[in-house]
Amino acid sequence: MAGGSFLVDTNVLIRWVQPEDASFPVAYAAVERMMLSSSFPCYVSQNLGELWNVLTRPTHRNGYGLTPEQAEVRVRKIETAFLLLPDS
């Protein structure tokens, strides 16, 4: 799997930015392995919309219940570490 670009699914991104999630270790290890193999994890704008929805949705509706400010910190983490692909 050396080299190449990979579109990371929103489900992985959600867990990668939320250390309190039970699946965080698996998501973190998967992304770390990708980066160590000289691969480029990527995202598209749709990922961020889906991510924002889950992060800010109330916990009683199967979300994380974060404030917009808390969600923004997590989105910036993705924007810094991953490559944005065009939606074309």
Image: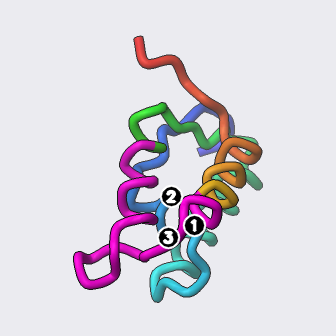
Q: CA distance from mark 2 to mark 3?
A: 5 Å
Question: From this viewpoint, which residue is outermost toward the left?
Answer: 61
State the image quarter where residue 87 is shown: top left
Is 53 magenta? The answer is: yes
Which residue appears at 47% of the width and 32% of the height?
Answer: 45
Q: Position of residue 21 (x, y in %)?
A: 49, 83
Q: CA gap, disc 3 to disc 1?
A: 4 Å
Q: Is residue 65 above or below residue 86?
A: below
In the rendered image, which residue does mark 3 sit on? 15
Residues marked 3 and 1 touching at CB (< 8 Å): yes
Sort mark 2 into few (<14), some (14-19) or many (20+) by Cα contacts within 10 Å.
Answer: many
Local packing at callout 3 (Cα closer than 10 Å; few below 14, some 14-19, many 20+) is: some
- Between 1 and 14, the residue placed more toward the observer is 14
Whether the magenta-drawn stretch holds residue 40 is answered as no
Q: Nearer the viewer, residue 67 or 42?
A: 67
Is 88 situated left or right of 75 in this image? left
Q: Which residue is mark 1?
A: 16
Magenta region, residue range: 49-71
In the image, residue 87 above or below residue 79: above
**Nearer-the-camera pick, 46 or 53:** 53
Residue at horizontal 25 percent and vertical 84 percent from the top = 60
The amino acid type of the residue labelled 2 equals Leu
Q: Mark 1 near mark 2, Cβ–Cβ under 8 Å?
A: yes
Q: Position of residue 24 (x, y in %)?
A: 54, 78
| Residue drawn where x is 59% and y is 45% of the image | 1
